């Protein structure tokens, strides 16, 4: 951990928000979200920023997240994370001197911590996320009685947090009596740590508090890896909730079986409900998401179709970056265009050229080359693997190829089938499922697959 005192971080934060002020045209956003923000704590390379409203939290964590982190990097020599907290969340953040602010064992963690602008209505659904969306809708109808836990995974910026919060908001709306809790797993780990270091009944009251929730949403569970004690507490809360038909939804950047550093019993519990993956959005869905986001903003500008087509070129796996860029283009438009003007592709092109933003190279997947290299690794002939033979050794390699095309390259089941003598998408699905189970039991396979997944 970096031993940088809070005062120094505070000074840096002030400089950073001054710098950001010059990018913000809308003075109200600056006043409401930035000017009133303060550094509350610095721990584990994370700066905890105290903000006044949920809106401010959303602006800092979504719209300005990347700008803030980039500005901070100018002053700090390590990778820094930011986390915005509201006043009511303060109680659970440990202050730097090691003194916990938790003052009484009967502390109430009652706040849902949901951002209410993430809804199911403004969540764009396409083939890339339909399964996850459908499962969430089923949970809304049959909360606690279906898919418990619901485990949703996928890379960053693919909408996991949005969907999870949208579920929480929908449940609050539909069943006002239900108690909902959303938490990021690193914050949960801190709560556990604080309660344990306080000793006495604190940890029991924390568990009791969690056991009262009807819907427990835990985001980015990968941050709990190798946190043994936290996992134990989580496991106990998890079992208790499931036993009482309370709903749990988990998100992660990896599938359960690839989450190294969790006990096996935990991984099997994660997989005991329904596990679904969100993949990269297709171009049409991406455009819908962009239009949706632009529509939510309070601006007078319309992006024409060509401008949207231009924007899509800058999508590089993480929607958050693209949306941040669109916000900056908006602000730039406020400065340089008359009200009600139309933002054209030319305007976008000029902006990105001025900012030296380069469109990412299209990530062209070459499934044949991938299949070829896997076959070579296993020393089997590619023509057999893509062919019809049912020799077990060959079909096993075939299934591994299918798994990798799905997990690493996010290809859809149907398309994968076309590379293997036009096999049906259900065949591909069961192959992926089979390998998923096999990874659990076979450490060598797990290692091999993890290596491939890491390689670019
Ligand atoms: P993740 O949690 O997977 O990293 P987020 O949920 O934070 O991703 O999404 C990043 C941004 O993209 C958010 O602003 C979110 O609202 C937006 N977003 C992602 N997927 C969708 C979608 N399907 N529809 C509308 N907005 C989306
Ligand atoms: Mg997220």
Image (cartoon, rainbow, N blue to C red):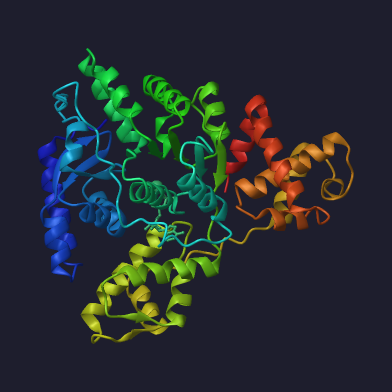
> Residue drawn at (50%, 35%), measured in percent from left and top?
149
Image quadrant containing the N terminus: top left
Q: Nearer the viewer, residue 440 or 144?
A: 144
Asked if residue 379 shows in the view, the reply is: no
Please determine whether, in this image, residue 422 is positioned above or below residue 380: below
Where residue 330 sits: x, y (%)?
Answer: 29, 74
Seen in the image, is 392 located left or right of residue 251?
right
Which quarter of the figure has residue 290? bottom left
Seen in the image, is 117 located left or right of residue 375?
left
Q: Nearer the viewer, residue 351 or 152?
A: 152
Please determine whether, in this image, residue 137 is positioned above or below residue 121: above
Where residue 396 sits: x, y (%)?
Answer: 78, 37
> Residue drawn at (48%, 76%), measured in percent from left and top?
309
Q: Nearer the viewer, residue 429 or 15?
A: 429
Where residue 79 sits: x, y (%)?
Answer: 31, 43
Where residue 294 sits: x, y (%)?
Answer: 35, 71
> Residue drawn at (23%, 18%), measured in percent from left and top?
202
Seen in the image, is 380 located left or right of residue 65?
right
């Amino acid at each position: 951990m970096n031993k940088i005192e809070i005062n120094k971080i505070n000074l840096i934060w002030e400089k950073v928000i001054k710098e950001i002020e010059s990018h913000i045209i809308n003075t109200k956003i600056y006043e409401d979200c930035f000017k009133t923000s303060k550094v509350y704590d610095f721990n584990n390379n994370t700066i905890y920023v105290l903000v006044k409203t949920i809106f401010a939290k959303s602006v800092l964590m979504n719209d300005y997240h990347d700008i803030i982190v980039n500005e901070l990097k100018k002053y700090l020599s390590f990778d820094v994370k930011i986390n915005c907290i509201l006043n009511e969340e303060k109680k659970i953040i440990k202050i730097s001197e090691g003194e916990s602010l938790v003052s009484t064992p009967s502390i109430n963690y009652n706040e849902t911590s949901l951002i209410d602008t993430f809804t199911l209505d403004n969540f764009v659904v396409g083939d890339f996320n339909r399964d996850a969306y459908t499962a969430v809708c089923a949970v809304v109808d049959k909360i606690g009685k279906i898919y418990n836990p619901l485990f949703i995974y996928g890379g960053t910026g693919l909408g996991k947090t949005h969907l999870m919060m949208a579920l929480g908001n929908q449940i609050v709306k539909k069943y006002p009596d239900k108690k909902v809790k959303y938490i990021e797993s690193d914050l949960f780990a801190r709560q556990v740590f604080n309660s344990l270091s306080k000793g006495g009944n604190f940890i029991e009251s924390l568990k009791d508090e969690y056991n009262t929730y009807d819907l427990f949403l835990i985001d980015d569970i990968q941050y709990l890896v190798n946190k043994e004690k936290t996992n134990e507490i989580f496991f106990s809360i998890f079992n208790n909730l499931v036993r009482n038909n309370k709903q749990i939804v988990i998100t992660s950047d990896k599938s359960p079986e690839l989450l190294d550093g969790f006990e096996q019993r935990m991984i099997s519990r994660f997989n005991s409900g329904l596990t679904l993956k969100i993949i990269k959005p297709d171009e049409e869905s991406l455009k819908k998401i962009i239009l949706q986001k632009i529509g939510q903003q309070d601006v007078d500008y319309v992006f024409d179709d060509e401008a949207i087509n231009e924007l899509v070129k800058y999508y590089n796996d993480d929607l958050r970056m693209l949306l941040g860029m669109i916000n900056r283009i908006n602000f730039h438009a406020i400065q340089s265009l008359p009200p009600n003007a139309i933002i054209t592709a030319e305007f976008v092109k000029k902006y990105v050229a001025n900012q030296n933003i380069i469109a990412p190279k299209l990530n062209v997947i070459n499934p044949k080359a991938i299949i070829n290299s896997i076959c070579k690794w296993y020393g089997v002939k590619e023509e057999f693997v893509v062919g019809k033979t049912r020799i077990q050794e060959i079909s096993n390699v075939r299934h591994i190829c299918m798994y990798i095309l799905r997990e690493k390259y996010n290809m859809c089941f149907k398309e994968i089938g076309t590379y293997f003598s036009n096999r049906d998408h259900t065949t591909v699905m069961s192959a992926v499922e089979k390998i998923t189970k096999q990874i659990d039991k076979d450490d060598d396979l797990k290692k091999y697959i993890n290596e491939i997944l890491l390689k670019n």
